[in-house]
Amino acid sequence: MAQYSLRDLRDDADRLGLRLVAGPIDERPIDRVDLVAVDRLDALTAGTLAIVPGDEQPPPFRIDVALRQASARGLAGIVFTTALALAETATVLAERGGVPVFSAAGVGSADLAKVIDRAISGGASEAMMRGAQAVTAATAAAGDTGNSTESILAAAGSVLGTELSLISDPEVSWTDTDAVFIGEVPIGRLVAGSTDGATEVSLPVIASLLSRVAQRQSRDRYAPTQSRADLLVELVLADSTRAEGFVGQAARLGLPLPQSHVVAWLAPTRPSDTDARAPRSVQPALELFALQLVEAREELWHVAFLQDDLMLVCTEEHGAGDHQRRVREVAMLIQRQAQELAGSDWTYTLGLGTPQLGALGLRQSAAEARIAAESAIAAGRFGGVELTDVTGLRRVLLDVYASPISRELLHDVLRPLDELGAERALLSVRTLLAYLAHDGSLVHAGKELMLHPNGVGYRMRRIRELLGIDLSDPDARFAVELACRVRLLGAA
């Protein structure tokens, strides 16, 4: 490690309580430090930093003599432990004689000598000690939950004698020693205005401390919102008969379910492999971005994930104007961020539901948004913003589709067709629906399917064999037709 120099002493001035009053600063080494009376400087050897104790400034003539002696003996410099105001002659002598003069008002001379002596002789051990002190100061500041990140950095920086700052860098790797994260989400890097052994020792520890503090602050800030989001996921996935049972629990969490809700649904797709899962790193980063985005808005917002899909819920008083437009604006910003996080191989398709009242209405809006996104993806329209046409029969089908139990029961009706494989099963469902919709007419079904009636008849014989259902029974016909419509609604 390089020998401690006058420049190092100047860099450590704030930490040591020193103030340079006069004289040059250069790379000359400081060999030793000694406490000495102002009239005994001629007894010191070259390279010594002289600390003159005392609370009162020596007479001007005494300072002039001391500066001449320090120059003649080749001393590294003089430190007066009092507030110092040099006469012009003393300033000139310090500059010409190459003697830096420091003031250390209010600093104990013995303690100052010990610290500087460690810096001179200790090298790595002094850096370790100062680094440990910085970590201790940062930890103490972090223990006060009212302190901000800036307060923690200021506490550590005052010990290190340099400014610490957190620089935003979303590309930082978790393996970097200066990286700061919230959970798995990269925030940035911890950097020091100037570096030395102490900063090299302490910065990785302080960066880790900041990550834990940021995680705690994020948890405290968003925990109520995230608890309500978990409840919303349960509500959306539950059977419709249980929906109203969530109202009381939601009220205790501060979620007014009886109000109006609009849901946006963001679904990721990799066009080259539509079965691929979204990158694992996207979800936590996108959740944090979304929570920070809506935090200052007047409406009540919640962000939840169902596997890779993001569900954004906005709750307002019934009758609030432009409810869906506000959701669209926010959701499109989240959509853009998701695209940037995932990269060019991925697309994020956004579906928007309509404003709906109450717990059942929230489920309805979620079903609309989800189907809008999934229908667009199935049709090859990746990365757009989609609205659902929810009029007439389609609204009834959406209600059925929104219930997991109803959806599963109807799926069981057509499950035997799945033995044919995905494509042939879908073709069979379309054929079956056309046949039923035209009251069993092979001719009219063939026109809709652009298929010869004999072709329709051949398909229907195979479908009847697989399903084993009597389609002449009105109840059976109704159940099969409803199952076909719900299946095609999901497949778009």
Image (spheres, rainbow, N blue to C red):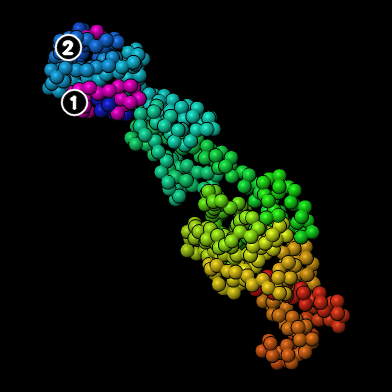
Q: Is residue 115 above or below residue 336?
A: above
Is tag 1's residue or tag 2's residue first in the polypeptide sequence?
1
Q: Which mark is residue 171?
A: none
* 71 to the left or right of 166: left
Q: Quadrant of the C terminus?
A: bottom right
Q: Label for residue 24? A: 1
Give the percent coordinates (x, y) of residue 465. 81, 80
Query: Which residue is rendered at x = 30% and y = 18% of the image?
Result: 104
Q: CA distance from mark 1 to mark 2?
A: 20 Å
Label tally: 2
The amino acid type of the residue labelled 2 equals Pro
Label 1 is placed on what type of residue? Answer: Pro
Q: Quadrant of residue 481?
A: bottom right
Residue 270 seen in the current view:
no
Residue 414 is covered by the magenta coloring: no
Quadrant that contains the N terminus? top left
Of 74 and 157, which appears nearest the observer? 157
Q: Which residues are magenta?
A: 11-38
Residue 491 rendering spot, x and y as whole percentages: 66, 72
> Can you tell which mark lies on residue 60?
2
**Label 1 SS:** loop
